[in-house]
Amino acid sequence: MARADRKHLVIGYGNELRGDDGAGCRIGRTVEHWAHPGTQVLVTHQLMPELAAALAEVRIATFIDVYPADQPRAPVNLYRIVRPHGLTSEHPGPHTCQPEDLLNLTEQVYGNRPVGWVLAVPAHDFSIGEQLTPSTTRAIQDALMLLRIHLDTMALAEDKELM
């Protein structure tokens, strides 16, 4: 996909060998099959500083991860990342960081900071294994519906901005 066509980067991440923690990766792979215009998808085990180069090429980034839920019907959350002042971690590790850290790093190194979003999916079981809990499996379906609406809305906003 040419740089001008890549407006949105979706990054699904998590550990697929730790139960529900792999939900972000599963959602990312599903979105890859949608072939949504202007959207690039990356699926990775964890966020790393090396992803800043891909983020520098887009205007919008959506990070898909899980959060530990204490209720079986906990909600899927989609929220915009508020522009932080400085790194969110005092010293981000060489291999892992938070979405906010990646956005800051991208701006510092490449001079571009995409608008960041997080799609947070409730997770209940982080034990070793690839099996998802029924609650997280249901939440993935909700997340996919919400993500499709989000991608369509962001694409429409980009189109209006370009006109």
Image: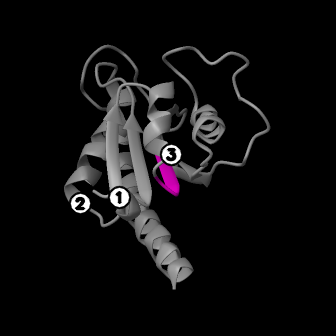
At 36% across and 15% down in the image, what residue appears?
A: 127
**Mark with earlier residue (1, 3):** 1
Confirm or deny contact between disc 2 and disc 1 (CB under 8 A): yes
- Along the viewing direction, whichever of 73 and 50 lies nearer the viewer: 50
Residue at (48% x, 17% y) in the render: 95
Of the numbered discs 2 and 1, the one sitting upstream in the chain is 2
Q: Is residue 24 left or right of residue 47?
A: left
Residue 155's spot in the image, x, y percent?
Answer: 44, 71
Kindly report which numbered mark, 2 or 1, lies closer to the viewer in this rendering: 1
Disc 2 secondary structure class: helix
Q: Which mark is residue 56?
A: 3
Query: Circle 2 is placed at which residue position?
Result: 34
Image vertical order of residue 6 relative to residue 116, above or below: below
Amino acid under disc 1: Thr
Could you tell me the amino acid type at mark 2?
A: Trp
C-alpha distance separating marks 2 and 1: 10 Å
Q: Nearer the viewer, residue 138 or 118?
A: 118
From the viewer's perspective, is residue 21 above or below residue 141? above
Mark 1 vs mark 3, CA separation in Å: 14 Å
* For residue 6, side relative to residue 61 (left or right): left
From the image, state whether disc 1 or disc 3 is nearer to you: 3
Instruction: Look at mark 1 in the image and give the residue it sits on.
Output: 39
46 to 51, vertically: above or below: above
Display colour scheme: one colour
Mark nearer the N terminus (3 vs 2): 2
**Res 140 visible:** yes
Describe the element under mark 1 as helix, strand or loop: strand
Q: Which residues are magenta?
A: 58-63
Is any atom of residue 48 visible in this view? no
Secondary structure beneath disc 3? loop
Q: Is residue 74 magenta?
A: no
